[in-house]
């Protein structure tokens, strides 16, 4: 069945790489529609070079590059870090948290351009198709979504290269970096090729944001990070915007080999996938945030929030950023952060990052008079006997019954 005339204009989430370049041309050829290319600047640097020229040379009628770095960190990364959200206890969700913002801006461009469709380059095997499309439908329940990987018959690298050659799309010839990667201010991810063997160590030349811990400086570096209402506001006394702060922490962490992780994760669609990630700034940020929380958060509030971390992280990973359950949980988490004001001092050394000091002038719950091992006048140690006996009562009764 012909796809011609089904769509008049589509906005494509466009990276400038081989896949989305082919998709751009494929949309023009298969749907006979105008294609607006959109690239989000989330801190990927030189990857955005020559994007407009590439897009227009491949058939785009227009190209947008939107600088979303501050919005990305302020409105997406920081709220997620208030929750200390880490998927399956290890993954900092660097790719996951970028997708709802890309979808949001893509839909804004679609509205401005009068487009009747949006498209993305995510495959039918991955998580990103869900993340993008849940975002699209949040902003326009009736939007037409075109996911070429679920429609076309270009199901191999060879088929893609043949299509590219046929239509004059440049094909990268270097095999030095054959894996797939995704980069933004929070992280860079690597998947595919040699990484599809879960036993094979990732090659050292793959890493972009960090030096090898073995090659990191022999002298540790200490970094002070100040927080207000759970968000970082300064590094070593220098007030920085959200994007600049995270960039600064990336620089410091990368220098010391901080933030490398190699994991097998469970995709939302059901399969396991191996990913290698570099998250230098995010690793420092999470450690420092925990440090300030440890001195300012009530025990039971912290334990309640921590019990919700796996659920919150799953929502972000699976694409439910705009879902009511995530928004409701965010409101609770943000309330827990009202007292998270203070500083953490973090020690960076050869791939390791740990808090070595924490303080809060306004919200500290640490009282040395109660906690001291020296003599005090505020705590009656004899009170502990009744506390222990009452808490042991059910255990004592159970033991008595077992002996009968």
Image (tube, rainbow, N blue to C red):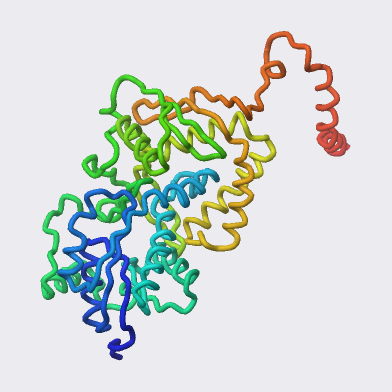
Who's the residue at 22% across and 50% down the image?
46
Choose top left, top right, bottom left or bottom right for residue 212: top left
Of the pair 318 and 185, the residue shown nearer to us: 185
Who's the residue at 43% across and 27% down the image?
237
In percent of width and height, residue 204 lies at 24, 40
Q: Is residue 379 left or right of residue 132?
A: right
- Figure quadrant of the C terminus: top right
Residue 266, relative to residue 352: is it above or below?
A: below
- Figure quadrant of the N terminus: bottom left
Residue 189, relative to residue 4: is it above or below?
A: above
In percent of width and height, residue 353 lies at 42, 30
Residue 207, relative to residue 101: is it above or below?
A: above
Choose top left, top right, bottom left or bottom right for residue 54: bottom left
Who's the residue at 52% across and 62% down the image?
322
**Furthest residue in direction bottom, as rendered:** 1
**Furthest residue in direction top, as rendered:** 375
In percent of width and height, residue 175 lies at 15, 54
In percent of width and height, residue 219 lies at 32, 19
Who's the residue at 21% across and 60% down the image?
51
Q: Is residue 2 left or right of residue 81?
A: left
Of the pair 63 and 183, the residue shown nearer to us: 63
Of the pair 313 and 327, the residue shown nearer to us: 327
Choose top left, top right, bottom left or bottom right for residue 95: bottom left
């Amino acid at each position: 069945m012909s796809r011609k005339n089904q769509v008049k204009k589509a906005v494509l989430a466009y990276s400038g790489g081989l896949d989305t370049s082919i998709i751009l041309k494929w949309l023009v050829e298969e749907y006979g529609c105008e294609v607006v290319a959109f690239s989000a600047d989330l801190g990927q640097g030189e990857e955005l070079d020559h994007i407009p020229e590439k897009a227009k040379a491949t058939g785009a009628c227009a190209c947008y590059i939107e600088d979303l770095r501050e919005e990305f960190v302020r409105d997406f990364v920081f709220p997620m870090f208030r929750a200390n959200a880490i998927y399956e206890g290890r993954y900092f969700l660097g790719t996951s948290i970028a997708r709802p913002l890309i979808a949001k801006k893509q839909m804004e461009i679609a509205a401005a351009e009068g487009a009747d469709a949006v498209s993305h380059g995510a495959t039918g095997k991955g998580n990103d198709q869900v993340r993008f499309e849940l975002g699209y439908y949040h902003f326009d329940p009736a939007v037409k979504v075109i996911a070429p990987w679920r429609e076309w018959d270009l199901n191999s690298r060879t088929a893609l290269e043949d299509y590219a050659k046929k239509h004059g799309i440049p094909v990268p010839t270097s095999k030095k970096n054959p894996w797939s990667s995704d980069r933004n201010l929070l992280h860079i991810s690597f998947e595919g090729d040699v990484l599809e063997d879960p036993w094979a160590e990732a090659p050292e030349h793959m890493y972009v944001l960090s030096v090898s811990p073995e090659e990191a400086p022999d002298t540790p570096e200490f970094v002070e990070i100040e927080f207000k209402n759970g968000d970082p506001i300064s590094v070593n006394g220098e007030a920085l915007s959200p994007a600049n702060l995270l960039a600064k922490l990336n620089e410091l962490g990368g220098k010391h080999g901080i933030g490398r992780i190699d994991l097998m994760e469970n995709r939302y669609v059901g399969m396991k996938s191996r990913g290698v990630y570099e998250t230098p700034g995010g690793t420092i940020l999470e450690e420092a945030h925990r440090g300030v929380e440890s001195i300012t958060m009530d025990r039971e509030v912290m334990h309640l929030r921590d019990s919700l971390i796996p659920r919150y992280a799953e929502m972000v990973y699976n694409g439910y950023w705009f879902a009511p359950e995530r928004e409701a949980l965010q409101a609770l988490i943000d309330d827990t952060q009202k007292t998270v004001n203070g500083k953490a001092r973090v020690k960076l050394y050869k791939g390791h990052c740990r808090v070595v000091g924490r303080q809060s002038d306004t919200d500290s719950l640490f009282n040395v008079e109660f906690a001291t091992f020296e003599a005090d006048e505020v705590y009656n140690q004899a009170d502990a006997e009744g506390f222990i006996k009452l808490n042991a009562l059910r255990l004592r009764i159970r033991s008595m019954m077992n002996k009968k």
